[in-house]
């Protein structure tokens, strides 16, 4: 077998958590053909290799694996996935928070489009099933390896729209049919977004019944829990109970506490609850992003009952004076002291872009309006296509959560270009280098080997990938070559759309895709399909 690439004279961190070692890695036909531990290739081996890179002074690690992304809804329009590759992500899993590009039921097209925030514009959906969606992505040749969850909210919409009702026996059968078809097509599991409608309408027994369908496939249930604020603990208890009752592996998504009243308290309790559950054999774990601000759609601030019936009914409720008055009162009551922490990151329409970068409190002051009223008005003005960045966490909680040995890193971001409109959350562009630069190198929260394991080997194992996530012979050659001393999460809240420093090379399936902070244009990513594996 001819050797296509050798990276020699480099510090290798293989993704297992084992100590780094000096050596070299050889790549042939997209896979790692040899790992030299404590040695170097011979002169003859080097002479027969098509390309040799001297990695002196740098670190070579597996490509970063983003266990929690939303790129399934953007990769179709941004196949180069700049925001992913430029921070070293080579593999990601979309369809999180209950929101996935598939399945799609034409009967509820308007509801699907609103739920996906019109990610696909007015163009027709080219798929109905997860299988058809994956084939479509395969045909556009993405730069990043990508798999997907099936979203509970998406399945619920395909079955019953934005109805707040509990599913009938027949509807429950339909939901299970959608889920099973998605798993057969290669979905890596089921995700839920219980803070968002229609996921918020689901009761615990509905979720348990669906999670039971995951067990024969050894697939994951990833949950954006019902509450990450004042009711964080009951939400964690619900997630653990689901794991116990269903037998499914439960991944608590982007674990955090977003209410100041419970900082340095609630997450200590929640982590302890997870530890105790794990000790009694419950399969539960979590992922986390390394920022003190969250990001989501602005309409997440509206009480869930206003969404009953979908977008048209929501907008009707926001315009109806009597209903609007009730919504303003209820929303303001739940946002005491919080409007100044919520900033507009994207607003559709030229006439609305003045609001980008401003807090709801500031917008309300400019417009001389009540804050909830200002929030509702910009939602209506943008047809719901408006996003927020919300400063809700504290560093002490972030570091405590990140120090736990059963947590992995997930960005909660998506594939974006460097000229994406608005001021998106920097997690889209800088999550993984931030863990290395800030929490590992500067804060010394853990070793570099542990940091890399949380971003490569652990998520690969959790998602059932047996050929990625490690620098080992036979693995696909997803690799990041970086300078540990200079790696930096350059993207900031004010200027997020930029490549990270210190990442010299990123390989996807053995193909150079990023070189010195620039995308090479390569589109060598694979579409990933789940096959049951023992976890």
Image (cartoon, rainbow, N blue to C red):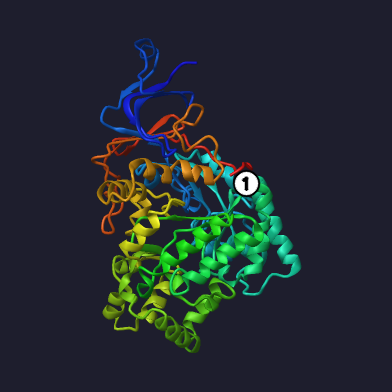
- Rendering coords of residue 518 (x, y %): 31, 38
**Disc 1 designates what residue?**
132
- Quadrant containing the C terminus in the rendered view: top right
Residue 137: x and y, percent? 54, 43
Q: Mark 1 falls on what kind of element?
A: helix
Could you say which is closer to the camera, residue 489 or residue 260?
A: 260
> Viewed as shown, does residue 34 lie left or right of 480?
right
Furthest residue toward right: 170
Give neighbour class at mark 1: few <14, some 14-19, many 20+ (Cα, 10 Å): some
Q: Is residue 437 above or below residue 40?
A: below
State the residue in front, 300 or 223: 223
Q: Position of residue 18 (x, y in %)?
A: 41, 36
Q: Nearer the viewer, residue 446 or 414?
A: 446
Q: Position of residue 29 (x, y in %)?
A: 49, 24
Q: Is residue 147 left or right of residue 493?
A: right
Instruction: Residue at 33% x, 79% y: name it.
Output: 337
In the image, residue 72 above or below residue 42: below
């Amino acid at each position: 077998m001819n050797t296509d690439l050798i990276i020699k004279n480099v510090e290798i961190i293989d993704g297992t958590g084992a100590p780094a070692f000096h050596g070299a890695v050889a790549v042939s036909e997209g896979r790692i053909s040899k790992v030299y531990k404590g040695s170097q290739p011979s002169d003859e081996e080097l002479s027969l290799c098509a390309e040799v890179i001297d990695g002196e002074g740098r670190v070579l690690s597996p490509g970063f694996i983003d266990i929690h992304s939303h790129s399934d809804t953007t990769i179709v329009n941004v196949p180069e996935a700049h925001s992913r590759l430029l921070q070293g992500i080579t593999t990601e899993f979309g369809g999180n928070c209950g929101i996935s590009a598939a399945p799609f039921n034409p009967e509820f097209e308007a509801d699907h489009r609103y739920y996906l925030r019109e990610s696909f514009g007015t163009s027709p959906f080219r798929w109905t099933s997860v299988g058809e969606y994956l084939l479509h992505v395969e045909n556009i040749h993405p730069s990043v390896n990508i798999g997907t969850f099936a979203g509970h909210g998406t399945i619920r919409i395909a079955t019953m729209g934005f109805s707040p009702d509990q599913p009938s026996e027949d509807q429950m059968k339909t939901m299970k049919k959608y889920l099973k078809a998605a798993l057969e097509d290669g979905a890596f599991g089921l995700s839920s977004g219980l803070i968002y409608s229609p996921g918020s309408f689901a009761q615990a027994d509905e979720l348990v019944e669906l999670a039971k369908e995951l067990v024969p496939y050894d697939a994951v249930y990833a949950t954006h829990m019902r509450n990450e604020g004042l009711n964080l603990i009951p939400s964690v208890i619900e997630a653990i109970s689901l794991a116990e009752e269903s037998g499914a592996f439960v991944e608590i998504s982007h674990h955090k506490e977003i209410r100041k009243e419970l900082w340095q308290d609630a997450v200590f309790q929640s982590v302890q609850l997870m530890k105790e559950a794990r000790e009694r054999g419950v399969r539960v774990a979590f992922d986390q992003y390394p920022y003190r601000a969250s990001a989501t759609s602005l309409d997440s601030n509206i009480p869930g009952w206003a969404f009953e019936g979908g977008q048209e009914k929501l907008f009707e409720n926001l315009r109806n004076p009597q209903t609007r008055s009730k919504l303003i009162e209820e929303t303001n009551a739940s946002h005491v002291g919080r409007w100044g922490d919520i900033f507009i990151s994207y607003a559709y329409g030229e006439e609305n872009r003045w609001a980008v970068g401003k807090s709801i409190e500031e917008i309300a002051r400019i417009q001389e309006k009540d804050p909830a009223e200002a929030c509702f008005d910009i939602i209506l003005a943008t047809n719901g296509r408006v996003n927020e960045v919300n400063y809700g966490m504290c560093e002490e909680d972030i570091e405590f959560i990140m120090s736990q040995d059963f947590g992995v890193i997930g960005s909660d971001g998506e594939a974006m270009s460097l000229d994406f409109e608005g001021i998106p959350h920097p997690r889209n562009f800088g999550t993984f280098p931030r863990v290395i630069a800030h929490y590992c190198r500067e804060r010394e929260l853990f070793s570099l080997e542990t940091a890399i394991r949380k971003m490569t080997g652990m998520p690969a194992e959790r998602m059932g990938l047996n050929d990625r996530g490690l620098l080992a012979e036979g693995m696909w050659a997803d690799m990041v070559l970086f300078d540990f001393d200079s790696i930096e999460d350059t993207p900031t809240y004010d200027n997020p759309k930029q490549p990270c420093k210190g990442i010299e090379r990123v390989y996807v399936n053995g193909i150079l895709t990023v070189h010195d902070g620039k995308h090479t244009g390569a589109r060598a990513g694979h579409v990933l399909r789940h096959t049951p594996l023992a976890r």
